[in-house]
Image: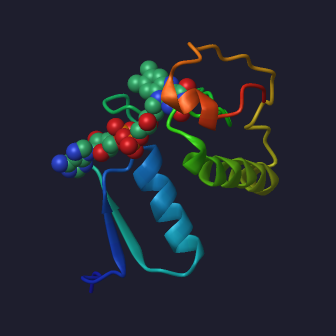
Amino acid sequence: MSRTSFDVIVVGLGAFGSATLYQLAKRGASVLGIDQFAPPHNKGSSHGNTRITRLAAGEGADYLPFIKRSHDIWQELEAQTGKRLYHRTGCSSQRPSATPSAAATPTRH
Ligand SMILES: Cc1cc2nc3c(=O)[nH]c(=O)nc-3n(C[C@H](O)[C@H](O)[C@H](O)COP(=O)(O)OP(=O)(O)OC[C@H]3O[C@@H](n4cnc5c(N)ncnc54)[C@H](O)[C@@H]3O)c2cc1C
């Protein structure tokens, strides 16, 4: 008989939905992921091979703990897969100093 109940059902399996599903499953939750297409597909935002991640998030300093934790998770995934997934490089971001969030974000990372 097929299963009919789950702890969590995630609808939408792009970067956010699939990461949520993965972390919940890792913690022992019974999970079901549903997508309108068959991931990985190129019909949402999470397509292509690369993404930039940076500490200087324009959204503000409140995002920093999440970003730092995501970098830890990339390292965990590298250890699990034996593949290099995260390539750390230098980056320089510029914006007018009058931009409100500029004061809240690091300028060098
Ligand atoms: C070209 C491009 C470059 C980018 N570069 C960067 C970058 O360098 N760094 C960065 O941090 N971010 C970048 N982003 C943004 C980042 O990719 C997105 O923020 C992220 O992929 C969004 O993921 P998501 O899971 O929210 O959405 P999506 O990846 O769009 O996933 C949503 C999923 O929900 C499914 N879905 C939608 N409606 C339904 C429904 N009714 N029923 C079932 N399934 C449904 C879709 O099929 C899809 O699979 C970029 C985005 C683009 C497009």
Question: Can residue 93 be seen in the rendering of this structure?
Answer: yes
Q: Is residue 95 above or below residue 89?
A: above
State the residue in front, 105 or 24.
105
Identify the image's colour scheme: rainbow, by chain, secondary structure or one colour: rainbow
- Identity of the residue furthest to the front in this view: 98
Q: Residue at x 74, y 53 (%)?
A: 72
Picture quadrant where residue 88 is located: top right
85 and 58: which one is in front?
Answer: 58
**Which residue shows up at 54% across the image and 40% down it?**
60
Residue furthest to the bottom: 1
Judge left or right: residue 30 versus residue 54. Answer: left
Q: Position of residue 78 (x, y in %)?
A: 77, 48
Residue depicted at x 58% and y 78%:
27
Of residue 37 and residue 109, the one placed in the foreground of this image is 109
Task: Look at the image and tell me whether residue 40 can be seen.
Answer: no
Lateral position of residue 94 relative to residue 8, left or right: right
Find residue 93 and report its image quarter.
top right
